[in-house]
Image: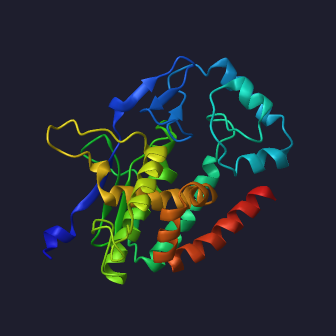
Amino acid sequence: MSDDTLRLAASDHFKDGLVEELDDGFERLGAVESPFTLRIPPEATTPEKVQEARRLHADRPRDERRRDELRSDPVTRDFDLWKDNMDEYDFPGVDTLSQTIQQKRAEAAADIARSLFNLSSIKRDVPFDDPKVRGRYWATPPTIELRTTETDFPGWTYPCVLAHELGHTADNQAKYWRRFYSEGNLDADSLFETQTQLRQARTLSERLRGEITESDIPGAQNYRETKSEKAADAFGAIVLEPDRTRQHASAIATRLETVFEDFFTQFNRARQDIDTAWLS
């Protein structure tokens, strides 16, 4: 393998052409609706229903509020449905999984990756030439570069992009540990063994980063259709939403947690400490 091949980077691009303005004041990133693909536009006035939802959530007992912010319940933009069933639904930007928790989980995962995956460094606020790039992973030396903003869609903010790039890091390490990685054929000698695992990884990718569409370039494939991108998002999903991912994407979650058993053993302990501190 040449030095040039070793230095090829995985660059992750935000596609603003997917942004859709919704009638209730939210914006959605493509057709898939999730806590990560919905936001209030940065320049917009916060809709009254969102303001009221935030007030109602803030008035809940602290214990109840914090437990809700640890869960990943189904998201709804129906204010009345949410108001009557706060323990069953999440309202976007109100009681969805806490950004603080996401960041702590992603940073705990990064600490483990530094030792287990030989991650060399994580650089923030990198001035990429392409303004649409939010993250990049270099294989040699294993390096993560990030440039995110708080006004991005939730799935493209710092915790999510960091967790995704850690997925690339893990995928690259599988080459050395197991002599396989995500881009191999679907069998026992690949990170993806089955179509079910690959399909679930695609669903997780769209939940986090929005709809996967056809490439704008005729004859070209959207880079997000590659197995390595789906593997990185599936890995990131287990870091950010471990319980939900195991419940809704058990095939790929089990596979990744088996391949990277040492990592997830350590991460699960760190995650429990983070969650316990959040509730204390």
Q: Nearer the viewer, residue 52 or 227?
A: 227
Q: x%, y% of residue 100?
A: 63, 51
Picture quadrant of residue 279: bottom right
Name, please, the residue furthest toward the right. Answer: 61
Vertical relation: 108 (above or below) 229: below
Vertical relation: 229 (above or below) 140: above
Query: How is the model colour-coded?
Result: rainbow
Residue that appears at 25% across and 60% down: 9
Residue that appears at 40% across and 72% down: 119
Residue 186 falls left or right of residue 83: left
Any part of residue 212 in sight: yes
Vertical relation: 190 (above or below) 76: below
Placement of the C terminus among the 4 image quadrants: bottom right
Any part of residue 106 in sight: no
Vertical relation: 232 (above or below) 114: above
Q: x%, y% of residue 205?
A: 43, 50
Residue 116 falls left or right of residue 87: left
Placement of the N terminus among the 4 image quadrants: bottom left
Q: x%, y% of residue 200?
A: 46, 55
Q: x%, y% of residue 47?
A: 62, 19
